[in-house]
């Protein structure tokens, strides 16, 4: 793709790509802005034109709320609950290995998630303000400065599930990620995390933790079933300027009758998806922010890939001082399971 002339309309992605990124079609160079700008760019790559149930509402200014104060006894209760082992069945492990994802009910106390939602909303407002211009708000590395978030992100219970699903002895944290899809925000494009995370390992998975019930009209995370589904599209060239990649992915999945699980999430239900699992999320057609906390874990001993790309975002933020080829073991990547607390 050549740079548009003054008489040609510029792709929406140009609003968020730097001048250097606009000049090249490839993704080989590293991302040169922050992660909120990455999300602003990435959401322009979703195909929404033919969404028959597209957004029916427009984002409104966010309401300011008083900071959530949680006493020490409540924090201790949350920490204890998040340390209790989860009884993962052999059938669940088998399903994850076959389908590339699994949804598990009653993993986290709903009341604890309500408190977390309030806290993360306050964090996002502090970081990004209250204006309605951002259809998709995000923040990362919250665990470094917020005790409540830290209990969830470093949770032995959640990391234990990740470790057992992957079949590895120990997992480290890659990063946390607050994901708030605002009213009227369109689809999240089809993608798989192996394309995004600069981790030289297949033993990587993400826990996606809804912070409210997510009905279909709010845009729950949706999965293309089958751990090998990526093979259908692994040679499809990525386009960083428009929605053609996302559109082609969706068509290939439809042509090959790939089952898509786009069902609702109850509060307390969370999902885990493998780095090879293709997933997307629908538009938020409600008047409420669709908020989730995502935490990604990888097998202890994995290395940073030799050539990270712009699709990996601001990855140095998540693993300071780690260079290509190094084992990822910075202070920001603690072992979460088994932990030594």
Image: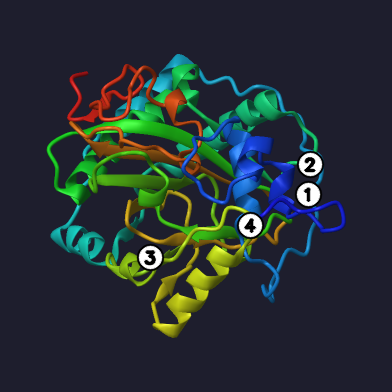
Q: Are marks 3 and 1 in contact (CB under 8 Å)?
A: no
Report the disc number at residue 143: none
- Element at badge 2? loop
Residue drawn at 61 percent across, 26 percent down: 123
Report the disc number at residue 133: 2
Report the disc number at residue 235: 3
Observer-side mark, 3 or 1, equals 3
* Residue 287 as seen in the image, left or right of residue 211: right
Q: Position of residue 303 (x, y in %)?
A: 24, 33
Q: Work out whether mark 2 precedes mark 3 in sequence or the reverse, and give the earlier one.
A: 2
Q: Work out whether mark 4 precedes mark 1 in sequence or the reverse, and give the earlier one.
A: 4
Decide which of 292, 172 is in the foreground and name it: 172
Mark 3 closeness class: few <14, some 14–19, many ≥20 residues within 10 Å: few
Residue bearing the label numbered 4: 1
* Residue 9 as seen in the image, left or right of residue 106: right
Residue drawn at 28 percent across, 45 percent down: 204
Decide which of 166, 32 is in the foreground and name it: 32
Instruction: Look at the image and tell me whether residue 262 can be seen.
Output: yes
Mark 2 closeness class: few <14, some 14–19, many ≥20 residues within 10 Å: few
Observer-side mark, 4 or 1, equals 4
Decide which of 213, 167 is in the foreground and name it: 167
């Amino acid at each position: 793709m050549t740079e548009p002339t003054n008489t040609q309309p510029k792709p929406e992605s140009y609003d968020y790509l730097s001048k250097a990124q606009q000049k090249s079609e490839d993704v080989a160079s590293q991302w040169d802005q922050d992660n909120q700008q990455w999300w602003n760019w990435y959401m322009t790559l979703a195909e929404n034109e033919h969404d028959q149930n597209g957004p029916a509402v427009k984002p409104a200014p966010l309401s300011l709320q008083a900071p959530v104060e949680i006493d020490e006894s409540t924090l201790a209760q949350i920490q204890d609950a998040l340390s209790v082992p989860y009884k993962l069945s052999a059938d669940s492990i088998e399903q994850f290995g076959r389908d590339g994802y699994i949804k598990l009910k009653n993993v986290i106390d709903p009341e604890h998630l309500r408190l977390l939602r309030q806290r993360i909303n306050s964090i996002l407002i502090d970081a990004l303000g209250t204006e309605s211009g951002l259809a998709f708000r995000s923040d990362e590395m919250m665990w470094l400065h917020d005790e409540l978030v830290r209990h969830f992100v470093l949770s032995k219970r959640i990391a234990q599930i990740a470790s057992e699903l992957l079949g590895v002895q120990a997992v480290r944290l890659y990063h946390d990620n607050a994901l708030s899809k605002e009213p009227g925000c369109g689809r999240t494009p089809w993608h798989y995390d192996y394309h995004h995370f600069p981790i030289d390992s297949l033993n990587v998975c993400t826990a996606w933790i809804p912070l409210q019930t997510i009905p279909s009209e709010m845009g729950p995370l949706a999965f293309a079933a089958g751990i090998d589904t990526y093979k259908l599209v692994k040679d499809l060239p990525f386009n960083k300027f428009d929605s053609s990649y996302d559109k082609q992915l969706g068509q290939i999945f439809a042509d090959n009758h790939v089952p898509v699980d786009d069902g609702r999430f109850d509060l307390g239900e969370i999902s885990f998806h493998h780095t090879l699992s293709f997933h997307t999320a629908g538009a938020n057609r409600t008047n409420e922010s669709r908020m989730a906390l995502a935490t990604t874990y990888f097998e202890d001993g994995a290395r940073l890939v030799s050539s990270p790309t712009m699709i990996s975002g601001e990855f140095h933020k998540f693993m300071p001082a780690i260079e290509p080829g190094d084992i990822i073991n910075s202070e920001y990547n603690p072992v979460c399971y088994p932990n030594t607390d």
